Image (cartoon, grey):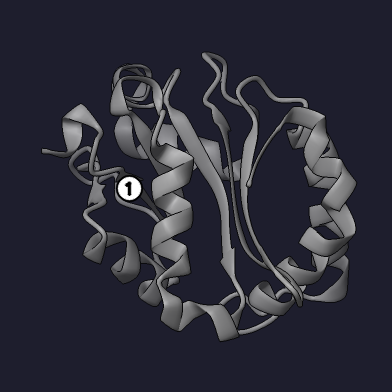
């Protein structure tokens, strides 16, 4: 199921429950306050241009979800975006990321992981990415998650010499610069 914009808010509580199960575990170990901030972020993010969420549901509720939006020309003033710009430089951010589909969250409950649900959600989410351009910023400390994306064909955007930091920028298999 794909939700665009504010329609996702009808399922906000179920999304928060799935988020909590996934991200309270290692390597994220998010606390209750951070989990509740996801609910607040979801309300704001649903208003972003190009916002979409792909959901997988079963009798037990939401088994997994993926959330993305189109990367704006003027990046928000956050530590993650500052690291992305520092790592790639403004010109490459413009070339590679602005206007591309930016993956924000991918969460799959433990019981649904062996079914390949993460791969399915990513595939559905990025199927109509502008010119095949999709990307995700991710913590280098999330080694298993980074390795999973790499197995699915996502490639790291090379950092500027000496500019590597705690964030890795992964480009989707369909991204022209990922080849």
Looking at the picture, does residue 75 appear above or below residue 1? above
Residue at position x 39%, y 48% from top? 123
| Location of residue 65 in the rendering, given as x and y in whole percent from the top left corner | 61, 57
| Left or right of residue 21: residue 135 | left
Q: Nearer the viewer, residue 30 or 15?
A: 15
Bin the neighbour count of mark 1 within 10 Å (Cα to Cα): few under 14, some 14-19, many 20 and up.
many
| Location of residue 47 in the rendering, given as x and y in whole percent from the top left corner | 77, 26
Q: Quadrant of the C terminus?
A: top left
- Judge whether residue 101 can be spotted in this image: yes
Image quarter of residue 131: top left
Residue at position x 81%, y 35% from top? 7
User: Hey, which residue is sitting farthest front in the picture?
Assistant: 59
Image quarter of residue 61: bottom right
Residue at position x 41%, y 28% from top? 128
User: Hey, which residue is sitting farthest left in the picture?
Assistant: 179
The secondary structure type at the circle numbered 1 is: strand
- Judge whether residue 166 can be spotted in this image: no
Image quarter of residue 2: top right
Residue at position x 76%, y 33% from top? 46
| Left or right of residue 161: residue 122 | right
| Left or right of residue 127: residue 104 | right
Looking at the picture, does residue 55 appear above or below residue 27? above
| Location of residue 170 in the rendering, given as x and y in whole percent from the top left corner | 32, 47
Looking at the picture, does residue 120 appear above or below residue 84? below
Looking at the picture, does residue 13 appear above or below residue 84? below
The residue where tag 1 is placed is: 170
Q: Nearer the viewer, residue 67 or 79?
A: 67
């Amino acid at each position: 199921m794909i939700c665009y914009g504010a329609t996702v808010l009808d399922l906000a509580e179920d999304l928060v429950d799935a988020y909590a199960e996934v991200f309270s575990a290692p390597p994220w170990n998010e606390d209750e306050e951070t989990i509740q901030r996801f609910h607040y972020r979801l309300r704001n993010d649903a208003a972003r241009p190009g916002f979409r969420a792909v959901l997988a549901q079963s009798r037990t509720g939401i088994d997994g979800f993926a959330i993305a939006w189109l990367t704006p020309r003027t990046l928000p003033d956050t530590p993650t975006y500052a690291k992305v710009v520092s790592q790639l430089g403004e010109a490459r951010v413009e070339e590679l990321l602005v206007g591309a589909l930016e993956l924000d969250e991918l969460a799959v409950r433990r019981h649904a992981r062996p079914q390949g649900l993460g791969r399915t959600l990513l595939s559905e989410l990025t199927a109509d990415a502008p010119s095949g351009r999709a990307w995700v910023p991710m913590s280098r400390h999330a080694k298993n998650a980074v390795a999973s994306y790499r197995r699915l064909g996502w490639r790291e955007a090379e950092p500027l010499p000496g500019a590597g930091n705690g964030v890795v920028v992964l480009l989707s298999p369909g991204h022209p610069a990922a080849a």
